[in-house]
Amino acid sequence: MPPAVPIDSDLDPFDSTILSVAELDALWKATTLGGGLAAWAQVFDVANFDAALGSALVIDRVRCAKDTQNLVYSIGHGLGTDGVTYKEFCGRSSNGGQTWNWYEIGEIDAPGEEFTIGASSGAENGTTTTFGGGSGLVTCSIQFLGTQPFNNSQRQVYLQFPEEFVHIGGTELAIEYDVTGDFPSNTFDTAADAPPTFPAGSFPSQIVNITSTTPIEGGLHCEGIFYPAGISWGDYSKLLFGWRAAAEGKWTGMSTVLRASMMSNLIIDGVAYGAQPSRAFDVAPTQGSWLYYGATDRVWKSEDGGATWAILLEDTGAYDICVDPQAAGAIYFWGVDGNLNLAVVDVVTSTGLMTETALNIPLRIARDPSSGRLLALPNGTTLTMRNLGSNTDLKTGLTGATGLHAYPGQKIIFLDDADIWISDNIQAVSPTITAKQGGWSEYAGGVNAHRMQAIA
């Protein structure tokens, strides 16, 4: 049985019929690719993560070393032994995934820095919100802004949970919080200090179930259950509390799904959630023991196969990393500010080679091993080449493009939400970039693509 929801993969550079695949909670190995149905085997389960390091591991990436056969790495994050602090971890297998050793990279610093909470109040008014709280309690203050009356518009305050929230133990978690501030009045026309009525059953949700609300000074105390397992989030969030115009002309409580921002400083059942790891990770092609990991606030490096890590750059974070195919000490990385940079021997030597809206999405940088030209997918919308100090757009109109790889002989591959794209003449003045869709239309949102070099 193959993995149900792959999030990353890497093709064995010594045998292109072998594929390593990551899920959030497991690592897999497929063999006999290209010769009929693949044979799948699960080679790691997060339930077997070393308890001496931490718990609630979530897998983020998997990579094969290109110079050492059967050497496979994985990156993940989870709770440290204190059960509160989030940390990044590196897994290493020297036998093609049969056994794994895991090592700590470092703490995900300043939990909550990468998150905000948001509010939606319809077309007329904006809102501002602040968070605070203690063990087992979240306090949210709500302030409605603007001069227009609250007419026929929803007023919502929401939180978005990061991906790791889905897999924290896979069990129900108690949640409680206070909500205070200026509420819309029951007659829609002015702000008031009294919250609206929250009738029983007004918070139905498969993810959050608010079981009770108790009036407190200036607001409500809410209690309920959060169900973290089995939810596919994407960029959605779950509304925890809000108001909408009821048929009788009053505001009523509601719970629903909506597009949102991220969360900040949320503490549930005594555990702090708020650290968002980057997915930036690469292995030097010419030195398989040199690893690079990009956190949201720094870049880490290991020169001993992940056993020990040191801070390479502490003034910037990285959302994507690509090690130069010829020089193990040179890395290209998308900074968290949206700039594509070059660092050589632990020093940033070039910044802003390309720019984009910062995306925490990997596999969008590649260096052509035949010519040294730099290829990238800024914002996932355009394939761009940098050569002799200038950038040229080779393919536009893409959506969610990722999975970019370059091979000797001018060959590349990448994918977007609709197609798989290849080129066999990427160095040409006008390269041919062809969609190889096949049955791709039956799926959505691919995560990686590879060319089986033996049969490419």
Image: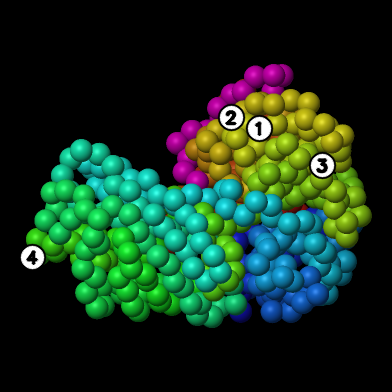
Give the amino acid type for the residue marked by disc 2 in the picture.
Thr
Which mark is drawn over residue 291? Answer: none
Give the amino acid type for the residue marked by disc 1 in the picture.
Leu
Relative image position of residue 434 (x, y in whole percent): 54, 41
Callout 4: SS = loop
Give the residue number, with chain letter if any, for mark 4: 248
| Of callouts 4 and 1, the N-terminal one | 4
Give the amino acid type for the residue marked by disc 4 in the picture.
Glu
Callout 2: SS = loop
How many C-alpha atoms fall within 10 Å of the one at disc 4: few (<14), some, or many (≥20)? few
Give the residue number, with chain letter if any, for mark 1: 340
Callout 3: SS = strand
Q: Give the foreground label among 1 and 3.
A: 3
Which mark is drawn over residue 355? Answer: 2
In magenta, the rendered stretch is 387-400
- The answer to whether the residue labelled 1 contacts the one labelled 2, judged by CB atoms less than 8 Å apart, is yes
Which mark is drawn over residue 312? Answer: 3
> Residue 331 vs residue 340: left or right?
right
How many C-alpha atoms fall within 10 Å of the one at disc 1: few (<14), some, or many (≥20)? many
Callout 1: SS = strand
**Above or below, comparing residue 55 to residue 378 in the picture:** below
In reply to whether residue 427 is colored magenta, the answer given is no
Front one among 32 and 221 = 221
Alpha-carbon span between mark 2 and mark 4: 51 Å
How many C-alpha atoms fall within 10 Å of the one at disc 3: few (<14), some, or many (≥20)? some
How many C-alpha atoms fall within 10 Å of the one at disc 2: few (<14), some, or many (≥20)? some
